[in-house]
């Protein structure tokens, strides 16, 4: 998994040549901490999908630009476009559905 911030979001996510699943979270967020092992499992099973973490406290600009209002918020981007959004703790099968439906 890759960490992105206000400065690297464009290159890591919007300009990526593969689908990107972005986890908008914060260090103090309990559900965000529970989401991390799910994302690690998903990432290991789906090497064709780039998984990127964005800490909303350290990257408030990109969080605001993407309309993040709750955490965790997961967004799937493909070709620079947001294709799906899910708020709250998600399981691997839900993440797989997001990718399949996009």
Image (cartoon, rainbow, N blue to C red):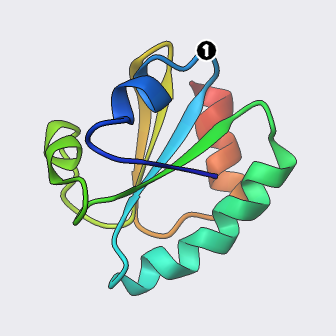
Is 43 on the left or on the right of 61, as rendered? right
Q: Nearer the viewer, residue 28 or 3?
A: 3
What secondary structure is marked by label 1? loop
- Residue 42 in percent (x, y) is at 74, 54
Is 36 on the left or on the right of 28, as rendered? right
- Residue 54 in percent (x, y) is at 39, 54
Residue count near mark 1 (Cα–Cα under 10 Å), binned few <14, some 14–19, many ≥20: few
Q: Residue at x 43, y 24 (%)?
A: 11
Is 87 on the left or on the right of 47, as rendered? left
**Outermost residue, right direction?**
45
- Residue 27 in percent (x, y) is at 37, 79
Q: Nearer the viewer, residue 68 or 15?
A: 15
Q: Residue at x 83, y 52 (%)?
A: 44
Q: Residue at x 72, y 62 (%)?
A: 40
- Residue 80 in percent (x, y) is at 42, 17
Q: Indicate the quadrant where residue 65 lies.
A: top left
* Residue under numbered circle 1: 17
Quarter holding the C terminus is top right
Q: Residue at x 64, y 37 (%)?
A: 50
**Outermost residue, front direction?**
7
Asked if residue 28 is positioned above or below residue 10 in the image, the reply reads: below
């Amino acid at each position: 998994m890759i960490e992105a911030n206000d400065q690297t979001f464009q290159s890591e996510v919007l300009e990526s040549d593969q689908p990107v699943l972005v986890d908008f979270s914060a260090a103090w967020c309990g559900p965000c901490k529970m989401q991390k092992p799910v994302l690690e499992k998903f990432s290991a099973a789906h090497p064709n999908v780039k998984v990127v973490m964005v800490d909303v406290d350290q990257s408030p600009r990109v969080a605001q630009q993407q309309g993040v209002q709750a955490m965790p918020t997961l967004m799937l981007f493909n070709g620079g476009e947001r294709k799906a959004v899910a708020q709250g703790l998600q399981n691997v099968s839900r993440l797989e559905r997001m990718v399949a439906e996009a």
